[in-house]
Image: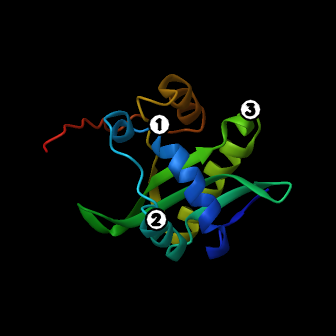
C-alpha cells in the first residue's frame, strides 16, 4: 500500500535512506552516512506533500521524496525533482516501486508542477531504471557529472 508519509514514518524512512546511501557515489568514495542527515530532506518533501511510503503488512518497505520550485527561466511554471526513490530489494519485483513513482507524480501534479524529473544513479541498476523511465514517458534531459573538489 502506498500512502502519504507521516512524521512517525521518519525512523523507518531514515533506515531506508541509509541503505539508499550505500548505493551512492559518495558512499563508494568513503563518505559514511551520518544519522539524522535525511531528516532535512524528509521535512522538505513532507512539507510539500511529496513524501510517500510503501507499506506491506504494517512495515515500511520503501519511500520516495521530492521537491518542487518554479523553473529558473519561467517562474510561473512549477517543476520538481526526485530527492530519493528507494524500495527494499526484497520488494523490487513487486509493483511497490512503480506505485511509489506514480504517487510522487500525482503529488507533484496536485502541487501544480508541469514537469517532473527523476534521477538514475550509475551505481544502482542504471539500464533497468532507464527502461522504467522511458516506459513511463520520461525523456533523457540532462546528465550529471560529479567531481570531488575537496
Whether residue 105 is visible to the viewer of this picture, yes or no, is no
Q: Quadrant of the C terminus?
A: top left
* 1 or 2: tag closer to the N-terminus: 1
Q: Nearer the viewer, residue 88 or 112?
A: 88
> CA gap, disc 2 to disc 3?
29 Å
Relative horizontal placement of residue 114, taking residue 146 as reference (left or right): right
Residue 93 has which mark? 3
**Element carrying mark 3:** loop
> CA gap, disc 1 to disc 2?
18 Å
Q: Position of residue 17 (x, y in %)?
A: 53, 52
* 1 or 3: tag closer to the N-terminus: 1
* 2 or 3: tag closer to the N-terminus: 2
Q: Quadrant of the N terminus?
A: bottom right
Return the residue at label 2: 36
State whether residue 128 is above or below residue 139. above
Please tell me which residue is depicted at 59% across the width and 51% down the height of the picture: 16
Number of numbered labels in the structure image: 3
**Residue density around tag 2, few if under 14, some if 14–19, many if 20 or more, within 10 Å:** few
Q: Position of residue 112 (x, y in %)?
A: 49, 69
Residue 23 has which mark? 1
Please tell me which residue is depicted at 55% across the width and 59% down the height of the picture: 14
> CA gap, disc 1 to disc 3?
18 Å
Amino acid at each position: 500500500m502506498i500512502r502519504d508519509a507521516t512524521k512517525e514514518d521518519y525512523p523507518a524512512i531514515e533506515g531506508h535512506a541509509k541503505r539508499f546511501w550505500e548505493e551512492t557515489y559518495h558512499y563508494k568514495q568513503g563518505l559514511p552516512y551520518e544519522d539524522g542527515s535525511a531528516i532535512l530532506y524528509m521535512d522538505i518533501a513532507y512539507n510539500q506533500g511529496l513524501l510517500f511510503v510503501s507499506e506491506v503488512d504494517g512495515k515500511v518497505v520503501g519511500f520516495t521524496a521530492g521537491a518542487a520550485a518554479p523553473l529558473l527561466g519561467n517562474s510561473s511554471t512549477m517543476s520538481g525533482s526526485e530527492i530519493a526513490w528507494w524500495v527494499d530489494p526484497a520488494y523490487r519485483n513487486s509493483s511497490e516501486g512503480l506505485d511509489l513513482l506514480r504517487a510522487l507524480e500525482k503529488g507533484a501534479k496536485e502541487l501544480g508542477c508541469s514537469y517532473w524529473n527523476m534521477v538514475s544513479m550509475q551505481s544502482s541498476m542504471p539500464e533497468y531504471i532507464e527502461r522504467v523511465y522511458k516506459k513511463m514517458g520520461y525523456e533523457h534531459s540532462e546528465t550529471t557529472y560529479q567531481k570531488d573538489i575537496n
